[in-house]
Amino acid sequence: MPLCSFYASTSLPVAKPHSVPSSSSRPSCTAVPAPATLTAAAAALSLHLPELPSRVKDKILSLELMGVDYGRALALNPALRDAAPESIHAVVAFLQSRGLHFKDLGRVFGMCPSLLTASVRADLRPVFAFLTDDLGVPDTAYRRVVVKCPRVLACSVRDQLRPALLYLRRLGFRDGRALAFQDPILLVSSVERTMIPKLDFLAGLGMSRDDAVAMVLRCPALFTFSVERNYKPKFEYLVSVMGGGVDDIKAFPQYFTFSLDKRIAPRHRAAADAGVAMPLPDMLKATDDEFREMLDKELELRKRKQPAA
């Protein structure tokens, strides 16, 4: 049976993870949309395809039924042109055996088309072994990590994942499982091109390297921000407009996580216009309603303190 027909007529079962958990924690089998719907979709797609060899057409339809744009995937991964449908199916079956749902595949392959031509043995198995052995991720939680950061699957354990983990551990990231669940993007970030330059920039603002490290430990998202588009304009605004400085970002590194145009500048202008001085965390973390309420309270207190005429 052609694979596109197989995907269209069958909800691929999710194989049990290699160490079988209890029935309550086992990843559920997620069915694809109704067979009749997918069969009709496959037929509709085939009408728009030119006269192509059946195996090529089968491959294209299989990917489209998973929600993968074949043209875009091919542009990003030219090796896909010569990939056999059976090899793609082997990757799909393996990922499902590790807990991924059929509905996840479109996003995973869309973000990382290289996975469509990956070797299960040489490329994918080592990543899942790394998740368990190095980070302590149980096999029942693989999906949680992969769905949050599909790029983990496309990285070399030897050249990227393990070096990044070792560097992060040297900085003070001790909980590997928390790193995998909350900030897996750090594992796919380059130590030399991304993390070290950002630490150097923060230290260059006038703080020690230890202070810069303390900031990223409190707010790991700092490693994901651009120096030119985030750090520089926000720090310049803090200093030149708000009258703040290095001590402010050391105390509240989350400052860099807020939008300059949509949160920082408007909130500061509103507080300044009202003549209210407000700590950065209070000013930025509050909802719009909470922020307005704080301003109103400060203004009301000021009125009460004014001597009667």
Image (cartoon, helix red, strand yellow):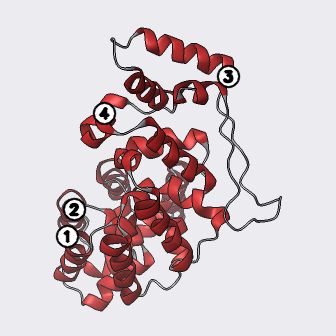
The percent position of residue 92, horizontal first and vertical second, equals 53, 45
Q: Earlier in the sequence, mark 4 or mark 1?
A: 4
The label shown at residue 72 is: 4
Does residue 160 show up?
yes
Q: Residue at x 30, y 73 (%)?
A: 159
10 Å crowding of disc 2: few (<14), some (14-19), many (20+): some
Residue designated by label 2: 237
10 Å crowding of disc 4: few (<14), some (14-19), many (20+): few
The label shown at residue 35 is: 3
Q: Secondary structure at mark 2?
A: helix
Q: Secondary structure at mark 1?
A: helix
10 Å crowding of disc 1: few (<14), some (14-19), many (20+): few
The label shown at residue 158 is: none
Q: Name above or below for residue 122 compared with residue 106.
A: below
The label shown at residue 193 is: 1
Q: Residue at x 25, y 36 (%)?
A: 75
Q: CA distance from mark 2 to mark 4?
A: 40 Å
Residue closest to the eye, 55 or 155: 55
